[in-house]
Amino acid sequence: MRMEISMRFQNKAVTAESIGAEQSAPPCFAKTDAFYELEQLIGLKKVKRTIAEVTAFALIQKQRNAKGLKPCPTVLHAIFKGNPGTGKTTVARLMGSIYRDIGILNRGHLVEAERADLVGEYIGHTAQKTREMIKKSLGGVLFVDEAYTLAQGGEKDFGQEAIVTLVKTMEDQRNNLVVILAGYCQEMDYFMRSNPGLRSRFPLQIDFADYESEQLFRIAVQMYADRDYELSNKCRWRLKARLDEFTRRRHPHSGNARYVRNLVEKSLRLQALRIVDASVLTRRDLMTVEEADLPDEAELQI
């Protein structure tokens, strides 16, 4: 994926100091491992474009500030909306690394959390747990999956306390923390309406679309290749037909790439079972996945 912006890539790292220095050339992205890995992800065109825009904007604000111009506020907290297996956690991890590489975050690590990590069992416990998770995330990204569950218990539920604590601490640590709240589209829309202060504090709304059949097929082939396996011709055609059928019948909470990963891992176990008793095994025998190795639908747990 080519970043559709006017900034050019360079091999050297971009630092806060180099951005602030006087230079005739425009600021540029670094060709870092995180950017490269983001480019290599299958699909996610709109997601990649949004990250390119946000990163470019952050770099330009640093440049404007260095030249005495009034910078616009850079708020990087985000809402990720989409079904399971659409790349939300992977992209959150890469965003942390990218923000570190351009000098916005000093660590760039990812801390994953869910309701149980933030909500306590008694008054005062929730604020303590939430602050502890934020403390672990300082300098990086706090990724809260299924964040809408924090607002599902009503006004007296401790989840509301977690939301209030999270919003307040985000403001206090806005220069050294990025919070990403993730979940299903409709549930996250409801969640954003549950607290009037949420929408203004999470200006980035990024939708993760379900993968198309061809994209799922490419993901599967990549997974096999990463493990030093390859598909026979019949297996490739059968796998493509399976994924075509999957995309036609999938429900709103289908697994997407998780379905593909389960299918790949199950097929490798079935391949091993098929060849384990062979007296002689060639390199090709060990690498090739046959049509018979693809699991039946009933064998997959999605």
Image (spheres, rainbow, N blue to C red):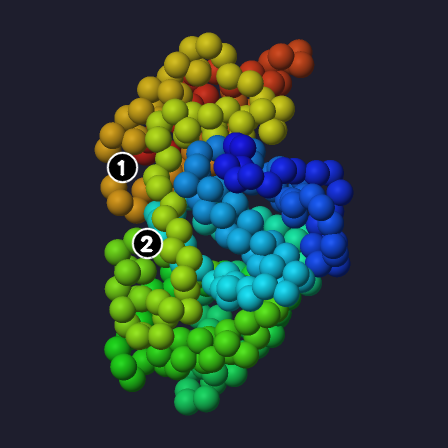
Residue under label 1: 250
Q: Residues within 10 Å of mark 1 (few under 14, many from 20)?
A: few
Residue 116 in the image: x percent, y percent?
Answer: 44, 70
Q: Position of residue 292 (x, y in %)?
A: 43, 17
Task: Report the front residue among 152 and 189.
Answer: 189
CA gap, disc 1 and disc 2: 15 Å
Q: Residue at x 38, y 69 (%)?
A: 200
297 left or right of 105? left
Q: Nearer the viewer, mark 1 or mark 2?
A: 2
Q: Is residue 278 above or below residue 151?
A: above
Q: x%, y% of residue 244?
A: 31, 24
| Residue drawn where x is 54% and y is 79% of the image | 172
Q: Which residue is mark 2?
A: 184
Which quadrant: the C terminus? top left
Q: Amino acid at mark 2?
A: Tyr
Which amino acid type is marked by label 1?
Arg
Indicate the position of residue 78 as horizontal and vertical percent values.
44, 59
User: 133 or 49, which is in the foreground?
Assistant: 49
Q: How many marks?
A: 2
| Mark closest to the chain's N terminus, 1 or 2 | 2
**Furthest-bottom residue in this view:** 123
Residue at point 35% right, 75% down? Answer: 197
Residue depicted at 74% across the width and 56% down the height: 21
Q: Nearer the viewer, residue 191 or 204?
A: 204
| Residue 140 appears in the picture as rendered | no
In the drawing, what numbered circle is on residue 219? none
